[in-house]
Amino acid sequence: MDEFLYTVDGAAVARAQSITLAEAGLRERQHLQEWVLEHPEMVGGSLLVITSECDRWSSARGRERDRLDVLALDPDGQTSRPAAAATAGSAAKAASSCAGR
């Protein structure tokens, strides 16, 4: 399902133009990531943020070089993006790897 954003000016309404974060003068880590940490519902449902900026985690392939920006679980203990961490178990491992940073 497509989602659209509209601007309202008095009685006039217009579909908002899509722009990039850079075009808006915003940065992913400095702005978007902080918004998600403050309001995790932005990315869907009731999420519990476990950790952020985690760079010490492993997957089935071994130690990952990529950094998890935000790791969150839904009420069923699943990650919000299964491609990022396939199971709650791997999320728990990632969280424990990043604990005490």
Image: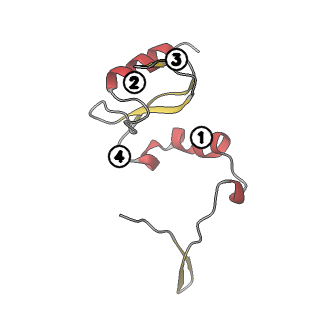
Mark toward the viewer: 4 or 3: 3
Mark earlier in primary sequence (2, 3): 2
Mark earlier in primary sequence (4, 3): 4
Which residue is at 56% across, 45% downward?
Answer: 35
**Which residue ends up furthest to the left in the rendered image?**
76
Alpha carbon separation for disc pair 4 and 2: 18 Å
Alpha carbon separation for disc pair 2 and 3: 11 Å
Helix, strand or loop under label 2? helix
Mark 3, residue position: 98
Report the disc number at residue 60: none
Helix, strand or loop under label 1? helix
Mark 4, residue position: 45
Mark 2, residue position: 91
Circle 3: residue type: Cys
Q: Position of residue 10 (x, y in %)?
A: 56, 84
Which residue is at 35% across, 29% downward?
Answer: 86
Number of residues whose C-alpha sits closer than 10 Å to that of mark 1, classed few (under 14), some (14–19) or many (20 or more): some
* Left-right relation of 24 to 73: right
Query: Toward which corner of the image does residue 76 lie, by quadrant?
Result: top left
Number of residues whose C-alpha sits closer than 10 Å to that of mark 3, classed few (under 14), some (14–19) or many (20 or more): some
Query: Toward which corner of the image does residue 55 lie, by quadrant?
Result: top right
